[in-house]
Amino acid sequence: MYRGTKITIVIPCYNEEDGIARVIRSLPGSIDEIVVVDNNSTDRTSEVSRELGARIVFEERKGYGAAYKAGLPEARGDITVTMDGDGTYPVEQIEECVNHLLDNNLDFVSACRFPLSDPSSMNFLNKVGNTILSWMTFLLFLRAIKDSQSGMWIFRTRIYNDIRPESDGMPFSEEIKIRAIRHPGMKFGEYHVNYHIRVGEVKLQKWRDGLRNLLYLFKLRFTM
Protein backbone atom coordinates (compact mmCIF):
# COMPACT_ATOMS: atom_id res chain seq x y z
CA MET A 1 0.00 0.00 0.00
CA TYR A 2 1.14 3.54 -0.76
CA ARG A 3 -0.89 6.48 0.52
CA GLY A 4 -3.86 4.20 0.93
CA THR A 5 -3.71 2.81 -2.61
CA LYS A 6 -2.57 -0.49 -4.08
CA ILE A 7 -0.14 -0.20 -7.00
CA THR A 8 0.24 -2.64 -9.87
CA ILE A 9 3.12 -2.39 -12.33
CA VAL A 10 2.64 -3.85 -15.80
CA ILE A 11 5.75 -4.55 -17.90
CA PRO A 12 5.63 -5.88 -21.49
CA CYS A 13 8.69 -7.95 -22.40
CA TYR A 14 10.18 -9.66 -25.40
CA ASN A 15 13.52 -11.35 -24.63
CA GLU A 16 14.40 -9.11 -21.69
CA GLU A 17 15.75 -11.61 -19.16
CA ASP A 18 18.66 -9.37 -18.15
CA GLY A 19 16.78 -6.09 -18.09
CA ILE A 20 13.67 -7.38 -16.34
CA ALA A 21 15.76 -8.85 -13.53
CA ARG A 22 17.31 -5.44 -12.87
CA VAL A 23 13.94 -3.68 -13.08
CA ILE A 24 12.12 -6.00 -10.67
CA ARG A 25 14.96 -6.03 -8.15
CA SER A 26 14.97 -2.22 -8.14
CA LEU A 27 11.23 -1.73 -7.60
CA PRO A 28 10.21 0.13 -4.44
CA GLY A 29 8.46 -1.79 -1.68
CA SER A 30 5.27 0.17 -2.34
CA ILE A 31 4.53 -1.95 -5.42
CA ASP A 32 1.83 -4.46 -4.49
CA GLU A 33 1.65 -6.43 -7.72
CA ILE A 34 4.02 -7.08 -10.64
CA VAL A 35 2.54 -8.22 -13.94
CA VAL A 36 5.02 -9.17 -16.67
CA VAL A 37 3.61 -9.75 -20.13
CA ASP A 38 5.74 -12.27 -22.00
CA ASN A 39 5.27 -11.38 -25.66
CA ASN A 40 6.38 -14.78 -26.97
CA SER A 41 9.96 -14.56 -25.69
CA THR A 42 12.53 -17.20 -26.59
CA ASP A 43 14.79 -16.58 -23.57
CA ARG A 44 14.19 -16.91 -19.80
CA THR A 45 12.16 -13.72 -19.38
CA SER A 46 9.21 -15.56 -17.82
CA GLU A 47 11.29 -17.80 -15.57
CA VAL A 48 13.38 -14.92 -14.25
CA SER A 49 10.32 -12.72 -13.68
CA ARG A 50 8.40 -15.47 -11.88
CA GLU A 51 11.36 -16.25 -9.63
CA LEU A 52 11.41 -12.58 -8.62
CA GLY A 53 7.73 -12.53 -7.68
CA ALA A 54 5.97 -11.43 -10.86
CA ARG A 55 2.71 -12.81 -12.21
CA ILE A 56 3.14 -13.81 -15.86
CA VAL A 57 0.66 -13.11 -18.62
CA PHE A 58 1.44 -14.71 -21.99
CA GLU A 59 0.59 -13.01 -25.28
CA GLU A 60 1.56 -14.90 -28.42
CA ARG A 61 0.65 -12.11 -30.83
CA LYS A 62 3.76 -10.00 -31.35
CA GLY A 63 3.43 -6.30 -30.73
CA TYR A 64 3.81 -3.61 -28.07
CA GLY A 65 0.10 -2.84 -28.06
CA ALA A 66 -0.90 -6.50 -28.13
CA ALA A 67 1.21 -7.10 -25.02
CA TYR A 68 -0.35 -4.20 -23.16
CA LYS A 69 -3.88 -5.18 -24.23
CA ALA A 70 -3.22 -8.56 -22.62
CA GLY A 71 -1.59 -7.20 -19.47
CA LEU A 72 -3.42 -4.02 -18.48
CA PRO A 73 -6.81 -5.69 -17.89
CA GLU A 74 -5.04 -8.01 -15.42
CA ALA A 75 -4.07 -5.18 -13.04
CA ARG A 76 -5.73 -5.50 -9.63
CA GLY A 77 -4.35 -2.40 -7.96
CA ASP A 78 -6.00 1.01 -7.61
CA ILE A 79 -3.18 2.60 -9.61
CA THR A 80 -1.42 1.08 -12.62
CA VAL A 81 2.16 1.95 -13.51
CA THR A 82 3.77 0.86 -16.77
CA MET A 83 7.34 0.78 -18.01
CA ASP A 84 9.57 -1.23 -20.32
CA GLY A 85 11.58 -4.23 -19.18
CA ASP A 86 14.89 -2.84 -20.45
CA GLY A 87 15.72 -0.58 -17.51
CA THR A 88 15.28 2.71 -19.39
CA TYR A 89 12.52 4.12 -17.18
CA PRO A 90 13.24 5.19 -13.59
CA VAL A 91 11.82 2.81 -11.00
CA GLU A 92 13.23 5.21 -8.41
CA GLN A 93 10.68 7.85 -9.47
CA ILE A 94 7.55 5.71 -9.38
CA GLU A 95 6.43 7.11 -6.04
CA GLU A 96 7.10 10.68 -7.24
CA CYS A 97 4.82 10.07 -10.20
CA VAL A 98 2.10 8.54 -8.02
CA ASN A 99 2.36 11.56 -5.72
CA HIS A 100 1.90 13.86 -8.72
CA LEU A 101 -1.22 11.93 -9.75
CA LEU A 102 -2.74 12.00 -6.27
CA ASP A 103 -1.72 15.51 -5.23
CA ASN A 104 -3.14 17.04 -8.41
CA ASN A 105 -6.25 14.84 -8.54
CA LEU A 106 -5.29 13.53 -11.98
CA ASP A 107 -6.50 10.39 -13.70
CA PHE A 108 -3.57 9.81 -16.05
CA VAL A 109 0.07 10.91 -15.82
CA SER A 110 2.52 10.34 -18.65
CA ALA A 111 6.19 10.34 -17.69
CA CYS A 112 8.05 12.91 -19.80
CA ARG A 113 11.68 12.17 -20.70
CA PHE A 114 12.51 15.57 -22.18
CA PRO A 115 14.77 17.35 -21.67
CA LEU A 116 16.90 14.24 -21.30
CA SER A 117 18.84 14.11 -18.03
CA ASP A 118 21.43 11.96 -19.82
CA PRO A 119 21.70 12.94 -23.52
CA SER A 120 23.46 9.66 -24.32
CA SER A 121 20.42 7.63 -23.26
CA MET A 122 18.68 8.27 -26.60
CA ASN A 123 20.22 8.42 -30.05
CA PHE A 124 19.80 11.37 -32.40
CA LEU A 125 17.26 9.77 -34.75
CA ASN A 126 15.01 8.76 -31.85
CA LYS A 127 15.13 12.32 -30.51
CA VAL A 128 14.15 13.72 -33.90
CA GLY A 129 11.39 11.15 -34.32
CA ASN A 130 9.95 11.88 -30.89
CA THR A 131 9.97 15.61 -31.61
CA ILE A 132 8.17 15.19 -34.95
CA LEU A 133 5.51 12.90 -33.49
CA SER A 134 4.88 15.16 -30.50
CA TRP A 135 4.50 18.18 -32.78
CA MET A 136 2.10 16.29 -35.04
CA THR A 137 0.07 15.29 -32.00
CA PHE A 138 -0.25 18.97 -31.13
CA LEU A 139 -1.18 19.98 -34.68
CA LEU A 140 -3.80 17.27 -35.06
CA PHE A 141 -5.35 17.30 -31.59
CA LEU A 142 -4.52 20.84 -30.37
CA ARG A 143 -3.07 19.55 -27.13
CA ALA A 144 0.61 19.98 -26.36
CA ILE A 145 2.34 16.80 -25.19
CA LYS A 146 6.06 17.10 -24.54
CA ASP A 147 6.67 13.36 -24.90
CA SER A 148 3.92 11.66 -26.90
CA GLN A 149 5.93 8.42 -27.19
CA SER A 150 6.75 7.82 -23.53
CA GLY A 151 6.19 4.25 -22.38
CA MET A 152 5.86 5.03 -18.66
CA TRP A 153 2.33 5.90 -17.54
CA ILE A 154 0.67 6.18 -14.16
CA PHE A 155 -3.11 6.06 -14.10
CA ARG A 156 -6.11 5.10 -12.03
CA THR A 157 -6.77 1.50 -13.00
CA ARG A 158 -10.52 1.99 -13.36
CA ILE A 159 -10.14 4.39 -16.31
CA TYR A 160 -8.63 1.78 -18.64
CA ASN A 161 -12.05 0.36 -19.45
CA ASP A 162 -13.16 3.85 -20.52
CA ILE A 163 -10.38 4.44 -23.05
CA ARG A 164 -9.44 0.97 -24.38
CA PRO A 165 -6.72 1.69 -27.00
CA GLU A 166 -6.95 -0.45 -30.13
CA SER A 167 -3.46 -0.54 -31.65
CA ASP A 168 -1.52 -3.81 -31.43
CA GLY A 169 1.78 -2.10 -32.23
CA MET A 170 3.95 0.83 -31.15
CA PRO A 171 1.19 3.43 -31.77
CA PHE A 172 -0.49 2.10 -28.61
CA SER A 173 1.70 4.50 -26.62
CA GLU A 174 0.47 7.66 -28.32
CA GLU A 175 -3.08 6.34 -28.58
CA ILE A 176 -3.56 5.72 -24.87
CA LYS A 177 -2.52 9.30 -24.11
CA ILE A 178 -4.75 10.82 -26.80
CA ARG A 179 -7.77 8.81 -25.68
CA ALA A 180 -7.19 9.88 -22.07
CA ILE A 181 -6.86 13.54 -23.10
CA ARG A 182 -9.99 13.50 -25.24
CA HIS A 183 -12.16 11.61 -22.79
CA PRO A 184 -14.70 13.99 -21.18
CA GLY A 185 -13.88 14.70 -17.57
CA MET A 186 -10.59 12.80 -17.55
CA LYS A 187 -7.66 14.77 -16.14
CA PHE A 188 -4.30 14.28 -17.86
CA GLY A 189 -0.84 15.53 -16.94
CA GLU A 190 2.87 14.95 -17.55
CA TYR A 191 5.70 14.59 -15.05
CA HIS A 192 9.40 14.83 -15.87
CA VAL A 193 11.51 11.73 -15.23
CA ASN A 194 15.05 10.57 -15.86
CA TYR A 195 15.74 8.22 -18.76
CA HIS A 196 18.49 5.59 -18.70
CA ILE A 197 20.55 3.65 -21.22
CA ARG A 198 18.76 0.41 -21.99
CA VAL A 199 19.91 -3.06 -20.95
CA GLY A 200 20.10 -5.56 -23.83
CA GLU A 201 19.36 -5.47 -27.53
CA VAL A 202 17.45 -2.58 -29.14
CA LYS A 203 14.27 -3.89 -30.78
CA LEU A 204 12.74 -0.66 -32.06
CA GLN A 205 12.81 -0.36 -35.87
CA LYS A 206 13.13 3.41 -36.16
CA TRP A 207 11.92 4.16 -39.67
CA ARG A 208 9.17 1.56 -39.83
CA ASP A 209 7.80 2.23 -36.35
CA GLY A 210 8.12 5.99 -36.74
CA LEU A 211 6.13 6.00 -39.98
CA ARG A 212 3.46 3.71 -38.52
CA ASN A 213 3.09 5.99 -35.50
CA LEU A 214 2.74 9.03 -37.74
CA LEU A 215 0.10 7.40 -39.94
CA TYR A 216 -1.77 6.19 -36.88
CA LEU A 217 -2.04 9.77 -35.60
CA PHE A 218 -3.92 10.71 -38.76
CA LYS A 219 -6.13 7.64 -38.43
CA LEU A 220 -7.03 8.61 -34.88
CA ARG A 221 -7.70 12.21 -35.82
CA PHE A 222 -10.24 11.30 -38.46
CA THR A 223 -11.88 8.30 -36.79
CA MET A 224 -12.25 9.25 -33.13
Image (cartoon, rainbow, N blue to C red):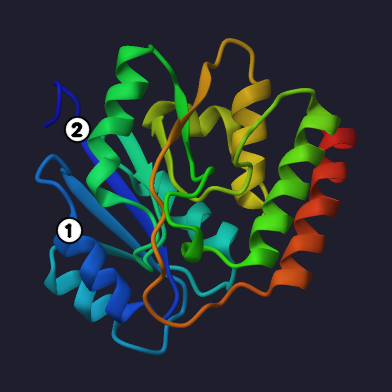
Q: What residue type is labelled 1?
A: Ser
Residue to which mark 1 is pinned: 26
Give the answer, above or below, for where 70 lies relative to 22: above
Q: Mark 2 points at which residue?
A: 6
Judge the density around disc 1: few (<14), some (14-19), many (≥20) Cα neighbours within 10 Å. few
Q: Could you tell me which quadrant the N terminus lies in?
A: top left
Q: Which mark is residue 97?
A: none
Give coordinates of residue 120: x percent, y percent.
Answer: 49, 65
Q: What residue type is labelled 2?
A: Lys
Q: Which of 126 and 173 is in front in this view?
A: 126
- Residue at 13 percent of width and 39 percent of height: 30
Q: Give the quadrant of the C terminus.
A: top right
What whole-number distance in Å separates the C-alpha atoms at marks 1 and 2? Answer: 18 Å
Left-right relation of 19 to 195? left
N-terminal of the pair, mark 1 or mark 2, is 2
Q: In the picture shown, does residue 45 fall above or below 79?
A: below
Q: Where is residue 65 in the image (x, y as percent from the top left)?
A: 58, 57
Residue for point 49% across, 55% down: 68
Callout 2: 10 Å neighbours few (<14), some, many (20+)?
Answer: some
Q: Residue at x 55, y 16 (%)?
A: 186
Say whether residue 45 is visible: no
* Residue 93 point in image, percent of width and height: 28, 41
Q: Nearer the viewer, mark 1 or mark 2?
A: 1
Indicate the position of residue 205 as horizontal and vertical percent values. Answer: 67, 75
Helix, strand or loop at label 2? It is loop
Residue 21's quadrant in the figure? Answer: bottom left
User: Residue 221, located in which quarter of the rendered image?
Assistant: top right
Q: In this view, does 102 lie to the left or right of 136?
A: left
Q: In this view, does 119 lie above or below 96?
A: below
Residue 222 appearing in the image: yes
